[in-house]
Amino acid sequence: MREACHTICLLELDEPLERVVAAQLGRAGYRTERGDSLAAVATAEPAPAAVVVDLDPLNARDWPEDVSWLLRCGQRAPLLLLASDRISPRRERTLGGATILYKPFTMRELRHRLADCLPADSGVKR
């Protein structure tokens, strides 16, 4: 069973990005695991320390359902959403206060944004 307090769930990241993010977070003391789906992550036990989701692969037609699962994930763990396109303020309000990081970004930016959304006692290194 995973250690929830130090496990970061990666969801919908393409393979090269996932490898780089997992390596960087591993150096910062985190264990990463790939989530199967928004629904699976929203109901996983124990909940991860945070969930990093790439919004780009999500289908626009499924947006209302995806937002519902994102909100459920966000009730259990901080969300860091990665996106190429700017999210409108109206759509951003539907995301329940999730942290958004726009592409392209540096791994340093990713670590800082993740650290900002985690509780102070989580042990993340910046």
Image: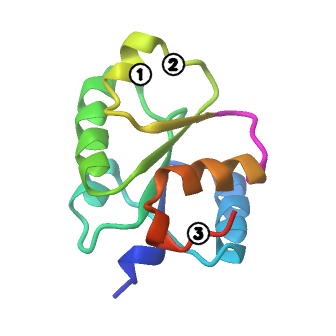
Estimate the spatial distance between the alpha carbons at disc 3 and disc 2, rounded to whole Å.
27 Å
Estimate the spatial distance between the alpha carbons at disc 3 and disc 1, rounded to whole Å.
26 Å
Residue at 38% x, 83% y is 2
Q: Amino acid at mark 1?
A: Glu
> On the rendered structure, is 67 left or right of 9?
left
Q: Amino acid at mark 2?
A: Ile
User: Mark 2 or mark 1, which has the lower sequence index?
Assistant: 2
Whether residue 100 is in magenta: the answer is no
Disc 2 designates what residue? Answer: 87
Vertical relation: 122 (above or below) 15: below
Q: Position of residue 117 (x, y in %)?
A: 48, 50
Which range is magenta? 102-107
Estimate the spatial distance between the alpha carbons at disc 2 and disc 1, rounded to whole Å.
6 Å
Vertical relation: 79 (above or below) 115: above
Disc 3 designates what residue? Answer: 124
Q: Position of residue 126 (x, y in %)?
A: 69, 62
Asked if disc 2 and disc 1 are in contact, CB closer than 8 Å, the reply is yes
Camera-side mark, 3 or 1: 3
Residue at 49% x, 39% y is 99
Q: Amino acid at mark 3?
A: Val
Q: Position of residue 34 (x, y in %)?
A: 48, 65
Q: Does residue 126 appear anywhere in the picture?
A: yes
Disc 1 designates what residue? Answer: 92
Judging depth in this view, the residue of 119 and 31 nearest the camera is 119
Is disc 3 placed on a helix, strand or loop? loop
Please name the predominant secondary structure of the magenta segment in the image.
Answer: loop
Asked if disc 3 and disc 2 are in contact, CB closer than 8 Å, the reply is no
